[in-house]
Amino acid sequence: MLTGDLVLAQRRKGILRPRFLNPADDDLRNLAMDLVACFNTAAEENWRRADVNETVEAILGDRQDTKRVRGLAKVAL
């Protein structure tokens, strides 16, 4: 589950509406595949959480859409 700081939502006329990622976005799909590959390797090789976090940070790099990609990483983990 996402933490509140990673939820994408808009409030209109007092109603909170979630915003969803576009599943057709090739960039986000490729990012998700990289994250899943990282987590699979971490599970197979018994990585420590610190090693997983370090690798995830390297995958995320200096992207500008940090809220979306950090949410994606949290859901994939």
Image (cartoon, rainbow, N blue to C red):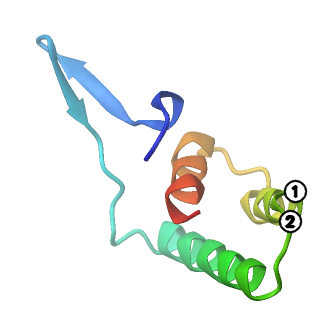
Image quadrant assignment for residue 30: bottom right
SS type, badge 1: helix
- Asked if 36 appears above or below 12 in the picture, the reply is below
Q: Farthest residue toward the bottom?
A: 44
SS type, badge 2: loop
Residue with the mark numbered 2: 48
Where residue 3 appears, x then y in whole percent? 49, 35
Q: Residue at x 86, y 65 (%)?
A: 48
- Asked if 33 appears above or below 2 in the picture, the reply is below
Where residue 17 appears, x then y in whole percent? 20, 31
Q: Amino acid at mark 1?
A: Ala
Q: Is residue 62 left or right of residue 19?
A: right
Q: Nearer the viewer, residue 45 or 12?
A: 45
Determine the CA span between mark 1 and mark 2: 5 Å
Q: Residue at x 60, y 49 (%)?
A: 70
Residue with the mark numbered 1: 50
Q: Mark 1 Cα within 10 Å, few/some/many (few <14, many 20+)?
A: few
